């Protein structure tokens, strides 16, 4: 099934690329590129991609289009795989997904619980030596790592109140289906259910799930307040959209076009990260308006519970990685 999905995505994009190639003379040899994501068109991530596409097109050098809300695929990893195979896609993944998909454990540190807690740090990230090393490792595998964007703090949305770590014990929570998600569940005591996002609402509605952990913009867009009435402000992950594209596509551009493309992407990531942060209060207000009880938990209690994740080095970090990251972000 997954192969069929991949082939279908590839065929759809290839048709677009071939069409663009056939019209290159008429369009002054513009560079075709598609931004493809799984979030709804109204989210900050999707709006950021549309803004980037518009700016690229305004330069006269690009023919950029945007396909969101799973129009090409609801599977982020499948979209990234298509980019790896050479299709001219830009895809928002996240560091944890990339770490698992491309076997780069150190990348997990960007999404590990309670490591990065300030969105402003992401502005400096692409200039660090660590980021450049991760870029080099990914490029060997056919992917260019462009930038990271703040996409909201993830918290627990549940059918029963969560005030303490013990309240999560035994709950069936939809979370990341990777090493980060599985280890968070292990130390906080819940059962991590790695299903697709589209299955969450009906899963909670049918009581096969007790909740999920997600960022507020996505929770609001999915109208989760209709099926869960409790939100615990654990802020355990600082979610980031990690934008990647095909190495073949990136390296096919002239140095000047690559520089322009990268600058527009990174500037937009900073701009929309700030927009997303500014919009969060309104989403939380809407949750309250729709009957959701928001609980400010003792975050120190949750941090203490996941300390063994780091003392045991369950994520397989290189020695001194955390100190190095913080040193380079200063």
Image (cartoon, rainbow, N blue to C red):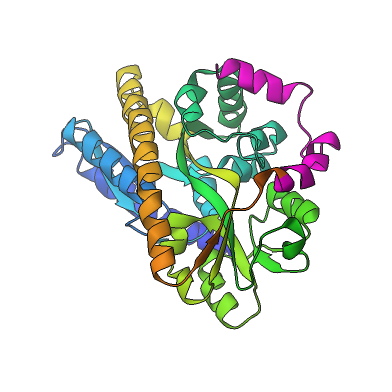
Which secondary structure is most common in the magenta stretch?
helix
Vertical placement of 319 versus 11: above or below?
A: above
Which residue is drawn at the image coordinates 43% and 65% (left, top)?
A: 288
Q: Is residue 238 visible?
A: yes
Vertical placement of 309 versus 252: above or below?
A: below
Give 274 or 45, whichever is nearer the viewer. Answer: 274
In the image, farthest residue toward the right: 312
Give 42 or 295, whichever is nearer the viewer. Answer: 295
Q: Is residue 85 visible?
A: no
Q: Position of residue 275 (x, y in %)?
A: 34, 41
Q: Position of residue 258 (x, y in %)?
A: 35, 24
Q: Quadrant of residue 162 in the image?
A: bottom right
* Residue 325 drawn in magenta: yes
Where does the C terminus fall, quadrant-wise? top right
Q: Which residues make up the magenta segment?
A: 301-330
Where does the N terminus fall, quadrant-wise? bottom right
Which residue is drawn at the image coordinates 66% and 65% (left, top)?
A: 173
Vertical placement of 31 versus 214: above or below?
A: above
Give 133 or 87, whichever is nearer the viewer. Answer: 133
Which residue is drawn at the image coordinates 56% and 26% (left, top)?
A: 135
Q: Position of residue 236 (x, y in %)?
A: 62, 47
- Whether residue 324 sits left or right of residue 220 in the image: it is right
* Residue 39 drawn in magenta: no
């Amino acid at each position: 099934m997954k192969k069929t999905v991949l082939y279908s995505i590839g065929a759809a994009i290839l048709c677009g690329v071939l069409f663009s190639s056939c019209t290159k003379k008429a369009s002054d040899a513009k560079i075709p590129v598609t931004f493809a994501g799984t979030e709804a068109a109204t989210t900050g991530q999707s709006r950021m991609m549309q803004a980037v596409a518009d700016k690229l097109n305004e330069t006269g050098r690009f023919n950029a289009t945007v396909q969101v809300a799973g129009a090409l695929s609801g599977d982020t990893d499948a979209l990234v795989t298509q980019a790896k195979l050479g299709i001219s896609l830009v895809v928002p993944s996240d560091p944890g997904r990339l770490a698992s998909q491309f076997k780069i454990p150190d990348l997990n540190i960007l999404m590990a619980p309670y490591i990065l807690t300030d969105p402003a740090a992401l502005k400096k990230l692409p200039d660090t030596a660590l980021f450049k090393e991760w870029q080099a490792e990914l490029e060997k595998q056919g992917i260019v790592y462009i930038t990271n964007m703040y996409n909201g703090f993830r918290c627990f949305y549940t059918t029963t109140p969560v005030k303490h770590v013990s309240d999560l014990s035994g709950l069936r929570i939809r979370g990341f289906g990777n090493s980060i998600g599985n280890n968070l569940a292990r130390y906080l005591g819940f059962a991590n259910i790695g299903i697709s996002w589209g299955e969450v609402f009906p899963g909670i509605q049918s009581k096969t799930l007790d909740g999920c952990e997600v960022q507020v913009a996505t929770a609001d867009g999915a109208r989760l307040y209709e099926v869960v009435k409790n939100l615990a402000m654990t802020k355990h992950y600082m979610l980031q959209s990690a934008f990647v594209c095909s190495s073949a596509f990136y390296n096919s551009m002239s140095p000047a076009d690559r520089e322009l493309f990268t600058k527009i992407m990174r500037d937009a990531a900073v701009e929309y990260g700030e927009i997303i942060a500014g919009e969060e209060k309104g989403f939380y207000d809407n949750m309250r308006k729709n009957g959701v009880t928001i609980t400010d938990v003792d975050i120190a209690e949750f941090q203490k519970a996941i300390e063994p994740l780091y003392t045991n080095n369950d994520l397989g970090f290189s020695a001194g990685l955390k100190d190095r990251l913080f040193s380079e972000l200063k």
